[in-house]
Amino acid sequence: QICVETGACTVYLNKEHVTESRVREQRHKELLKTVDVRVIECQSSLLYDPKDASLSTGFNGGHWGTLMPFLKGCKKQFGEPRRPNQRSEERSILSDLKGPDVWPN
């Protein structure tokens, strides 16, 4: 409704990485498509997308039992994670964005 009222043509969202959010995000994308609103999914500050990683079997469970095999597997497949953008670069990107001309009541 807000997209229609403001004339927004694009929605940016940070992806979550749990099953429930994937279902919710898909529902949102389908709904926004019906009103011709494009969805751009972002990773926020995530280093690696879990859906892209192929991990070996045999996790022992627990925080370190999943984190370290995931991190090592990602580094092996994708290399070191990219460095975050500098603040000045982020400021430049954000300054180019334009909000709606009219906000809903």
Image (tube, rainbow, N blue to C red):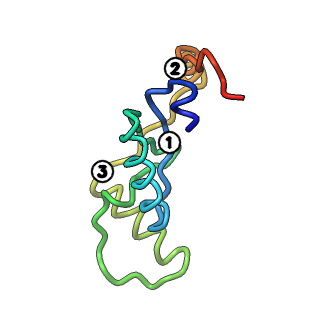
Q: Which residue is mark 3?
A: 78
Residue placed at 37% from the left, 49% from the top? 30
Residues marked 3 and 1 touching at CB (< 8 Å) = no
Residue placed at 40% from the left, 47% from the top? 29
Residue 58 image-quadrant placement: bottom left
Q: Which residue is mark 2?
A: 93
For label 1, the SS is strand
Q: Which residue is mark 1?
A: 13
In-front residue for pair 48/73: 48
In-front residue for pair 22/85: 22
| Nearest to N terminus: mark 1 or mark 2 | 1
- The amino acid type found where label 1 is placed reads Leu
Position in image of residue 19 (x %, y %) = 44, 68
| Nearest to N terminus: mark 3 or mark 2 | 3
Position in image of residue 42 (x %, y %) = 45, 41
- The amino acid type found where label 2 is placed reads Ile
- The amino acid type found where label 3 is placed reads Phe
Residue placed at 44% from the left, 27% from the top? 9
Residue placed at 40% from the left, 70% from the top? 69
- How dense is the environment of label 1, judged by Cα within 10 Å: few (below 14), some, or many (20 and up)? few
Q: Quadrant of the N terminus?
A: top right
The answer to whether residue 104 is left or right of residue 93 is right
Q: Quadrant of the C terminus?
A: top right
Above or below: residue 26 compared with residue 60: above
Above or below: residue 51 compared with residue 95: below
The answer to whether residue 60 is left or right of residue 54 is right
- How dense is the environment of label 2, judged by Cα within 10 Å: few (below 14), some, or many (20 and up)? few
Question: How many labels, in total?
Answer: 3
Cα separation, mark 1 vs mark 2, equals: 16 Å
Cα separation, mark 3 vs mark 1, equals: 24 Å
